[in-house]
Amino acid sequence: MSVQIYKRGKIWHYRGTVAGRRSRGTCGTSDKKTAQRIAAEVEAASWRRHLDGPAAHVTFAQAAIAYRNAGKSDRFLAKIEDHWRDAAIREISAGAIRNSSLKLYPNAKGATHNRQVIVPTQAIINFAAELEWCPPIKVKRFKTSTKTKIPATRDWISAFSDQAIADGLPHLAALAYFMFGTGARRGEACGLLWADIDLFNKKAVIHQSKIEDTRIAHMPQAVVVAIANISSNRNEDEHVFGYATGESVGQVWGNVCKRAGIAKLTPHSCRHGFATTMLQAGIDPKTVAMRGGWKDVATVMKHYAHAMDDPTVTDVLFDTPVTHTQAGKQASN
């Protein structure tokens, strides 16, 4: 039965079955000709949905709402949603997504285009594909230039902290120690509240913004001491290091580096140093990833495992107590 109209009081309504699916609603009018036109449009739309599939009518906004409701990360989504609004998913091509990144961030580099537009946009559409709303999509990433990241070392942290304390910034010194000693990201460390700190048991609850999870981090003694030095008059609802956001650390951080006469490393270099120092100390990558809050070992190996320049490092293949003794005898002769 096609969609038919009928009157209820003064208002016309429609009902019927199209392609095996029932359709019913109000035309919202007392005029019969208008009601007939509305019913015809409802029937035509029902056939389009049946023939074209859901992707023909699901909008990006609807897909984004479903994505958020599923508990997925909403990082970088605001600009993307404003750009696509009610565009049908079927009209969004891989090329259009790449162009949208250039429009949203015209002065950004490839890594930013990939991270803040291509990855989240593709994630929303592919989530909709899992719901059978549309086909999945694959978008070519922009080329990125690989920058050599310099990790912070224990000596660098010590020099930086000494200068920060001399400048009357003990909270900044404690922040550097905390990031280096726990692998916390800058934003995670700045978001730390006193309620998250247990100095007696050397533990801290870190709320990981990037992967939306929490982890319990062990604080080495040096970190505990640095935080204890700023713990007077503490309030559990206050930020431990006194910085509301990671962005507020940037300027003062660079000034301390300059006055200390040390390399101008970024706060993230502390997290980098955590991983690199652990790996060079012989801690296995899986443990480093777990203790530092990385989702997988591959990330740790790709970004933080640095090759050693010393060519004699291969001597370790035959390094035994016997070779140590022989080397000692040869040296004494």
Image: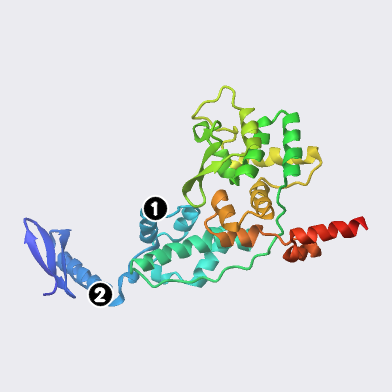
Q: Earlier in the sequence, mark 2 or mark 1?
A: 2
Looking at this view, is 52 or 13 the one in front? 52
Residue at the extreme bottom: 51
Q: SS of the residue at dot 1? A: loop
Looking at this view, is 96 or 232 the one in front? 232
Quadrant hosting residue 160: top right
Instruction: Please say if 73 is above or below 91.
Output: above
Horizontal relation, residue 333 to residue 232: left or right: right
Q: Amino acid at mark 2?
A: His
Residue at the extreme top: 233
The disc at residue 71 is 1
Screen quadrant of the C terminus: bottom right
Marks 2 and 1: CB-CB under 8 Å?
A: no
Instruction: Please say if 37 is above or below 186.
Output: below
Within 10 Å of disc 1 (Cα), the crowding (few <14, some 14-19, many 20+) is few
Q: Which residue is mark 2?
A: 50
Position in image of residue 312 (x %, y %): 80, 64
Residue at the extreme right: 333
Position in image of residue 290 (x %, y %): 54, 52
Position in image of residue 47 (x %, y %): 23, 75
Residue at image location 44% in from the left, 57% down from the top: 81
Quadrant hosting residue 99: bottom right
Screen quadrant of the N terminus: bottom left
Q: Is residue 106 visible?
A: no
Looking at this view, is 245 or 53 the one in front? 245
Residue at image location 70% in from the left, 37% down from the top: 252
Q: Is residue 302 visible?
A: yes
Give the Cα distance between marks 2 and 1. Answer: 30 Å
Looking at this view, is 55 or 13 the one in front? 55
Position in image of residue 205 (x %, y %): 50, 40
Instruction: Please say if 161 is above or below 304.
Output: above
